[in-house]
Structure formats: C-alpha cells, structure tokens
Image (spheres, rainbow, N blue to C red):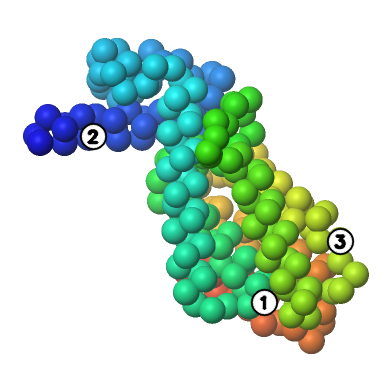
C-alpha cells in the first residue's frame, strides 16, 4: 500500500511538473529531460509511468476534461438558464486555470499538435458542443436573438477563451484571466442578448469576475 501511494504521488508530481512546463514553454519546446529535472525525479521513474511525452500530454488532457465535467455538474445543480449556465461554466474553467498548472496546460495543449486518443475527445470538440448546446438553449429561452448565428458565436467564444490565456500568458499573470473572460462576455452579451435581458447577464459576468479573480 505504501509503495502504491508513493507511485501515485510520483505520478502526480511528474504530471504537475510537465503541466507547468507545457504552459510556460509550450509542448513542442519541452523535453522529457526538462520534465525530469523540473519534477526532480529519475528518468526511470518518469518512464515507469509514461512511455512518451504524448502520454503525459494525454494524462493532462484527461485530468482537465474530468475537472471541466465537475464544473458542469456543479453548474447544472443550480438549475440556471442556458446562458447563465454557459457563463458560469467559463468562469469555473477560468478558476481552475488560475488555481493550478494542469488546467492552464490543458488550455495550451488544446492548440498543440497532439493526437487525442479515444475515448478522450479533443477539448475543442467538447467545448464547441457545450457552447453550441447552451446557446441553442438560450435562443429557445429568448436570452439570445433568434437570428443569431449560434455556430459562429460558439466557435468565437471557444477561440476567445483559449486564445485569451495562450496569447496573454507572457504578458500578464494567470490571475488576470477572469477579468479577460468578463471582457469577453461583455462583448458577446451586447451582441447576442436582447436589450431587455442584457443588464442581468452583464451584471452576472461582472459578479463572477469579482468572485473568481485573484489579482
């Protein structure tokens, strides 16, 4: 039992170290030797758990997918409208990215040249489907204009969310992400939501930004 616990702790240490490097330097620019040094483990320990760098990336994407599903479950328990659910989910994902390197690395790995192995699905595919479902629901609930291009809006939202972190990682701390997500929503809400319902969702984005930010 003690040996198994140590093995699990070593695996977690390696994943965290790899995630930190993938986020800061990119997947392509990070070597297994870099990860060994950053994790302070032996090469044998790394290869015991991961045969290749791709396996590490896949493990990080699996953990991120699991964390996002937990966020979705938490939001669903609130019984929110479709648009509020989508807004809360993006801030929940931002909170995860602020709190730890694994979700941050997951955002960057979504843009890397990595083959995602079944049954795991590519993050973009999952997020696009989620955004599309929620926006279609928002149209039915009259929270989004009936003539809105839902597919284009969902694609723009996902690209905005990922790009904000990836493009801004060298310019500002991860703790600034909630503010950028709020800015994203203020733009989208003004373009998608009918005027009579707009104030509610603008206020929600501002509230969630205050609750999520750390800087």
Q: Nearer the viewer, residue 199 or 83?
A: 83
Q: How far apart are the alpha carbons under marks 1 and 2?
A: 43 Å
Q: Nearer the viewer, residue 57 or 196?
A: 57
Crowd class of label 2 (few under 14; some 14 to 19; many from 20; radius 10 Å): few
Residue at which label 1 appears: 201
Secondary element at tag 1 = helix
Residue most toward the front?
119
Q: Earlier in the sequence, mark 1 or mark 2?
A: 2
Q: Nearer the viewer, residue 140 or 215?
A: 140
Q: Earlier in the sequence, mark 3 or mark 2?
A: 2
User: From what the image shows, is residue 212 above or below residue 27?
Assistant: below
Left or right: 129 as drawn, with respect to 100 = right
Find residue 108 and report its horizontal and vertical position in percent. 57, 36
Residue in the image at 67% along x and 77% along y = 201
User: From what the image shows, is residue 79 above or below residue 94?
Assistant: below
Left or right: 48 as drawn, with respect to 147 = left
Crowd class of label 3 (few under 14; some 14 to 19; many from 20; radius 10 Å): few
**Picture disc at residue 8:** 2
Camera-side mark, 1 or 2: 2
Secondary element at tag 3 = loop
Residue most toward the bottom?
196
Find residue 57 and report its horizontal and vertical position in percent. 48, 29
Q: How far apart are the alpha carbons under marks 1 and 3?
A: 19 Å
Residue at which label 3 appears: 149
Labelled pair 3, 2 in contact (Cβ < 8 Å): no
Residue in the image at 43% along x and 27% along y = 56
Left or right: 125 as drawn, with respect to 54 = right
Find residue 49 and report its horizontal and vertical position in percent. 31, 23
The image quarter containing residue 86 is: bottom right
Crowd class of label 1 (few under 14; some 14 to 19; many from 20; radius 10 Å): some
């Amino acid at each position: 039992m003690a040996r198994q616990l140590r093995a699990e702790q070593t695996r977690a240490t390696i994943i965290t170290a790899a995630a930190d490097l993938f986020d800061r330097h990119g997947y392509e620019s990070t070597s297994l030797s870099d990860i060994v040094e950053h994790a302070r483990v032996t090469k044998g320990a790394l290869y015991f758990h991961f045969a290749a760098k791709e396996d590490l990336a896949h493990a990080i994407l699996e953990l991120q997918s699991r964390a996002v599903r937990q966020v979705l479950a938490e939001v669903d328990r609130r019984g929110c409208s479709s648009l509020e659910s989508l807004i809360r989910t993006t801030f929940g994902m931002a909170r995860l990215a602020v709190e730890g390197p694994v979700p941050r690395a997951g955002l960057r790995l979504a843009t890397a040249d990595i083959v995602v192995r079944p049954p795991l699905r590519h993050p973009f595919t999952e997020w696009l489907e989620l955004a599309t479902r929620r926006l279609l629901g928002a149209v039915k609930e009259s929270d989004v204009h009936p003539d809105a291009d839902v597919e284009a809006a969902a694609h723009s939202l996902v690209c905005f969310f990922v790009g904000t972190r990836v493009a801004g990682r060298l310019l500002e701390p991860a703790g600034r992400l909630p503010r950028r997500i709020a800015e994203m929503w203020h733009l989208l809400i003004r373009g998608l939501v009918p005027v009579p319902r707009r104030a509610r969702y603008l206020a929600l984005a501002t509230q969630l930004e205050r609750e999520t930010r750390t800087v």
